[in-house]
Image (cartoon, rainbow, N blue to C red):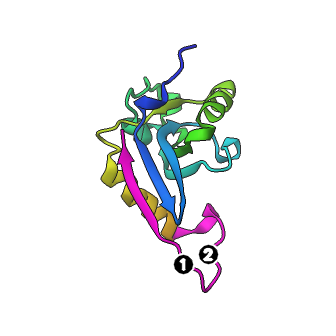
Amino acid sequence: MAHTPITATPTIVVAIGRQAQQFHAVVTTAPPPLDAPATLTLYDATLADVSGLAASPPVLHQERADARARLVLVEATEFAWQRARWREAHHLFTPADPVLVSLNTLQRWLWYRLRAGGDAGPAAPSGTEAQATVQLTN
């Protein structure tokens, strides 16, 4: 089985306070329960829709076109583990296209996700401030 090099994925660094984490953008058909703790869904739709964001879109058969797929950010230290877990369960794991999933796209979807809250985690306690810096790296 060929391994996807980490350097082939669009990468974004998210800094909150003095902590910075690097994330890689990938397309997957895996359901959220198979996600690593820091994996974050940016976009969830049908495979027919999401596959267009992949660097190498998969061949779609009619029966798979309506399956769920996601554009996700995988934290760099969890990348190899996440790839192995999803592939072991026979789910798609492919790098996002660095042109279509550009800095602007990642920033827009990440900010939308952070503002939406939901299952993204608890809000910061009142009286605290967090400053986030997002940048695309090669």
Whether residue 1 sits left or right of residue 15 in the image: it is: right
- Outermost residue on the bottom side: it is 127
**Residue 63: image tag:** none
Answer few, some or many: residues within 10 Å of disc 2's Cα (few below 14, many 20 plus, some between 14 and 19).
Answer: few
Could you tell me which secondary element the residue under label 1 belongs to? Answer: loop
| x and y, in percent, of residue 94 in the image | 48, 30
The relative height of residue 7 versus residue 100 in the rendered view (above or below) is above
Q: Are marks 2 and 1 in contact (CB under 8 Å)?
A: yes
Q: Which residues are magenta?
A: 116-138
Task: Say which quadrant the N terminus sits in.
Answer: top right
Could you tell me which secondary element the residue under label 2 belongs to? Answer: loop
Residue pictured at 56% horizontal, 51% vertical: 40
Which one is closest to the eye, mark 2 or mark 1?
1
Residue pictured at 53% horizontal, 15% vertical: 2
Whether residue 17 sits left or right of residue 7 in the image: it is: right
Residue pictured at 50% horizontal, 24% vertical: 4
Task: Say which quadrant the C terminus sits in.
Answer: top left
Q: Which residue is mark 1?
A: 129
| x and y, in percent, of residue 76 in the image | 55, 40
Q: Amino acid at mark 1?
A: Glu
The front one of 131 and 59 is: 131
Does the magenta segment cover residue 121? yes
| x and y, in percent, of residue 79 in the image | 59, 36
Which of the two discs, 2 and 1, labels the residue nearer the N terminus?
2
Q: Amino acid at mark 2?
A: Ala
The relative height of residue 57 versus residue 12 in the rendered view (above or below) is above
Q: How many marks?
A: 2
| x and y, in percent, of residue 34 in the image | 69, 41
Q: Which residue is mark 2?
A: 124
